Image (cartoon, rainbow, N blue to C red):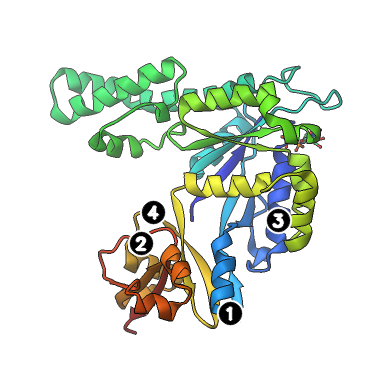
C-alpha cells in the first residue's frame, strides 16, 4: 500500500507529530496493531460522508478507511555522501511514495536548533539538497554512456540523453525533478529512474502553541508558503505539541477541545487528508445493513480493480458495479429513492471509479 514518509531535521517536532499520528491510530480499533512496524503509523481517514451514510443506512457497524505514515529515520546532512546513517535516510525515502517535510517555525529558547536559529527555508534547502545530490548521482551513473551513444545518433540514446541533460541541469541548479515538465513518453522513462526529488512533497509548518490562532502573521509560515508555492506544493500548519494532546481524544471530547482552541479541524486531520490526496488516493463506499464502510483506491482504477480491494474473488468474478455517487444518494435520501430516480448506474468492467461512489458489486463465485 502507498505510504507518506515524514522527514525533517532534528528538533523540528517530527517525533512529537509522529507520536500524535500513532496515538490517533491507536484509538481506532480497526487495525491489528500488534503486527505493525514501529516506524509505521496507521491513521483513519477523516470523512464526514461516512457519518451521513451511517445515519441513512443504520448499519450494525461503520468502518472508516486508513492509510500509513512512515517515520523516516537516519541522519540527513551528508546523506548523499553515503555516510552510514545518511545512506539509511535516503534508502528509507526511496521506499515511500510521497514526502511530508516537517519544518520548525516555533521559537523556543530551550530547544536547540541544529543550525543555531529558526530558519525554515534553510531547513528545507538542507534536506532538499541532499535529495538532489543523491538524484544527481543516480543519473550520472548513466550519463556518460548515454552521451556517447547519443553522439553516435543511436535513437533511444538521443531520447534518453535529452532527459538526462535536462535533469542534470536542474540538479546542478539545485532544482528538484518534480519542478520540471516532461512529455508523457519522457515521464515513463523518468519514472523508472526512481528519483527521490520526483516524489510529491508537502511541507508541515510546526508553529508554537500560542501562534496557532494567528498563523497568517507568522513570518516563518509565510516564508514556507512562498517557497512551497514556487514548487506547487501544499503547506499544512500544525502545532505538534497541541496535536499530541488532540490525538488523545475522540468523538465529542475532541470536538469540544477543538472548539476551545478555536479551530475547525485539527492539523493532523488536515495533514491526513492532504497526504491522501498527494498519494493519488480516493475513497469509495459500500453501504449495506451489516456494515457501512469506506475503502481506499488509487485514482484511475477500474471497477473490477477496486472490487479486488475487498476480495480477490470480487475482481475475478466481477459482473458489474451498481453505482451511485454520494451526492446523488444524499440528495435522493435513500438507496430505494435513488434507484427510482434512475441515479443508480450499472457500470461495467471499463468503468473508472470516482471518489465518493457508493458501490454494490455483483460477481460470480
Ligand atoms: P524531532 O527531533 O524533530 O523528532 O523533534 P521532537 O519531536 O523530539 O521535538 C524536539 C523538541 O521540541 C521537544 O522538546 C518537543 O517537545 C519540542 N516541540 C515539538 N513541537 C513543538 C511545538 O509545537 N512547540 C514547542 N514549544 N515545542 C515543540
Mark 4 sits near ligand 1, with its Cβ under 8 Å away: no
Inter-mark Cα distance, 1 to 3: 25 Å
Q: Residue 353's mark?
A: 2
User: Quick one: SS at disc 1?
Assistant: loop
Q: Residue at x 35, y 73 (%)?
A: 344
The residue tagged 3 is 24
Q: Earlier in the sequence, mark 1 or mark 3?
A: 3
**Viewer-proximal residue among 63 and 79:** 63
The residue tagged 4 is 299
- Above-or-below relation of 257 to 145: below
- Above-or-below relation of 271 to 105: below
**Viewer-proximal residue among 210 and 92:** 210
Around disc 4, counting alpha carbons within 10 Å, would you say few (fewer than 14), some (14 to 19), or many (20 or more)?
some
Q: Quadrant of ligand 1?
A: top right
Inter-mark Cα distance, 3 to 2: 29 Å
Q: Residue at x 61, y 77 (%)?
A: 61
Inter-mark Cα distance, 2 to 1: 25 Å
Question: Taking the image as drawn, is residue 173 in sight?
Answer: yes
Q: Which of the two marks, 4 or 1, is nearer to us in this view?
A: 1
Q: Residue at x 74, y 53 (%)?
A: 247
Q: Earlier in the sequence, mark 3 or mark 4?
A: 3
Q: Residue at x 67, y 64 (%)?
A: 33
Q: Earlier in the sequence, mark 3 or mark 2?
A: 3
Inter-mark Cα distance, 2 to 4: 8 Å
Question: Taking the image as drawn, is residue 80 in sight?
Answer: no
Place of residue 229 in the rendered image (x, y in percent of width and height, measured from the top left) = 50, 27
- Above-or-below relation of 60 to 41: below
Amino acid at each position: 500500500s502507498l505510504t507518506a514518509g515524514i522527514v525533517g531535521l532534528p528538533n523540528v517536532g517530527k517525533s512529537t507529530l509522529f507520536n500524535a499520528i500513532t496515538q490517533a491510530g491507536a484509538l481506532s480499533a480497526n487495525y491489528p496493531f500488534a503486527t505493525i512496524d514501529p516506524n509505521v503509523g496507521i491513521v483513519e481517514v477523516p470523512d464526514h460522508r461516512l457519518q451521513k451514510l451511517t445515519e441513512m443506512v443504520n448499519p450494525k457497524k461503520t468502518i472508516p478507511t486508513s492509510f500509513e505514515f512512515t517515520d523516516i529515520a537516519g541522519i540527513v546532512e551528508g546523506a548523499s555522501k553515503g555516510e552510514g546513517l545518511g545512506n539509511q535516510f535516503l534508502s528509507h525515502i526511496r521506499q515511500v511514495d510521497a514526502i511530508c517535510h516537517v519544518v520548525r517555525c516555533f521559537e523556543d529558547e530551550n530547544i536547540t536548533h541544529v543550525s543555531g536559529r529558526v530558519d525554515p527555508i534553510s531547513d528545507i534547502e538542507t534536506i532538499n539538497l541532499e535529495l538532489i545530490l543523491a538524484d544527481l548521482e543516480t543519473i550520472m551513473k548513466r550519463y556518460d554512456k548515454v552521451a556517447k551513444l547519443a553522439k553516435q545518433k543511436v535513437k533511444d540514446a538521443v531520447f534518453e540523453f535529452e532527459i538526462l541533460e535536462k535533469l542534470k541541469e536542474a540538479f546542478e541548479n539545485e532544482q528538484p525533478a518534480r519542478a520540471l515538465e516532461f512529455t508523457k513518453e519522457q515521464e515513463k522513462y523518468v519514472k523508472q529512474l526512481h528519483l527521490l526529488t520526483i516524489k510529491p512533497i508537502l511541507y508541515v509548518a510546526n508553529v508554537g502553541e500560542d501562534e496557532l490562532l494567528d498563523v497568517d502573521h507568522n513570518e516563518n509560515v509565510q516564508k514556507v508558503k512562498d517557497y512551497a508555492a514556487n514548487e506547487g506544493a501544499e503547506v499544512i500548519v500544525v502545532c505538534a505539541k497541541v496535536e499530541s494532546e488532540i490525538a488523545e481524544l475522540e468523538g465529542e471530547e475532541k470536538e469540544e477541545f477543538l472548539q476551545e482552541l478555536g479551530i475547525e479541524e485539527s492539523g493532523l486531520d488536515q495533514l491526513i487528508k492532504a497526504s491522501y490526496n498527494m498519494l493519488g488516493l480516493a475513497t469509495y463506499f459500500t453501504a449495506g445493513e451489516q456494515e457501512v464502510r469506506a475503502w481506499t483506491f488509487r485514482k484511475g482504477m477500474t471497477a473490477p480493480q477496486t472490487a479486488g480491494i475487498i476480495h480477490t474473488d470480487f475482481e475475478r468474478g466481477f459482473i458489474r458495479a451498481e453505482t451511485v455517487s454520494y451526492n446523488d444518494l444524499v440528495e435522493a435520501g435513500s438507496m430505494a429513492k435513488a434507484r427510482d430516480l434512475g441515479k443508480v448506474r450499472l457500470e461495467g468492467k471499463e468503468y473508472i471509479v470516482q471518489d465518493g461512489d457508493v458501490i454494490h458489486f455483483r460477481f460470480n463465485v
